[in-house]
Image (spheres, helix red, strand yellow):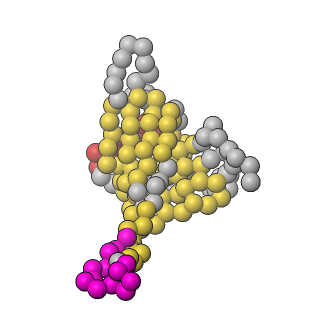
Amino acid sequence: MAEITGLRAKFYRETSTSDFEEITQVANLTPPQPEREVVDVEELAPEGDVLKKLPGAINAGQVNVTLNFDSKNNKHILLYQDFRQGSINRYRIKFQDGFGWTFSAFCSAFQMQDIESGSVIQVQVTLVLVGDYEFHEIEDGE
């Protein structure tokens, strides 16, 4: 399998017509980091003095997106509205090889980063995944 870079990775938000529209000017993107909980089984005399552990539920994690902020970019404002409304929406991350994540999430943070005269104004958006998610091949137009 060939390695790929993050170059040309894209971030999308589902519209009211169930299409996905690209959120432009993405500077940095951290995809979901799912993790399964580990359940410790308490027992005073475990076999071989080794504690038992059981697999628990999966925490789908969160996605962090840093945008080069443009207050006139309607899609950036939609993310801010997602934050203010606490609504659950569907999002997508697509890599240049056509694979990526599709997930439902709510926006838990919309944070302007340090504003300096010699830097691009950026905003960090945090999306907390709810329910199931999928890593799959994403067809064009899907």
Q: Quadrant of residue 130?
A: bottom left
Please state the horizontal and vertical placement of residue 129, each as a whole percent of the image: 40, 58
Q: Is residue 56 depicted above or below 74 in this figure?
A: below
Percent across and percent down for residue 99 are 64, 54
Q: Is residue 32 placed above or below 11 in the rendered structure?
A: below
Q: Is residue 110 visible?
A: yes
* The stretch drawn in magenta includes residue 39: yes
Residue at (44% x, 36% y) in the render: 66
Using residue 41 as the reference point, say whether residue 4 is left or right of it: right
Judge by depth and name the residue closer to the eye, 126 or 13: 126
Decide whether residue 91 is among the magenta residues: no
Q: Quadrant of the N terminus?
A: bottom right
In the image, the segment drawn in magenta is 38-50
Residue 15 visible in image: no
Q: Residue at x 34, y 21 (%)?
A: 115
Q: Where in the figure is residue 64, as x and y percent of width and height?
A: 42, 44
Question: Nearest the camera: 22 or 46?
Answer: 46
Q: Position of residue 52 (x, y in %)?
A: 37, 79
Camera-side residue of 113 and 105:
113
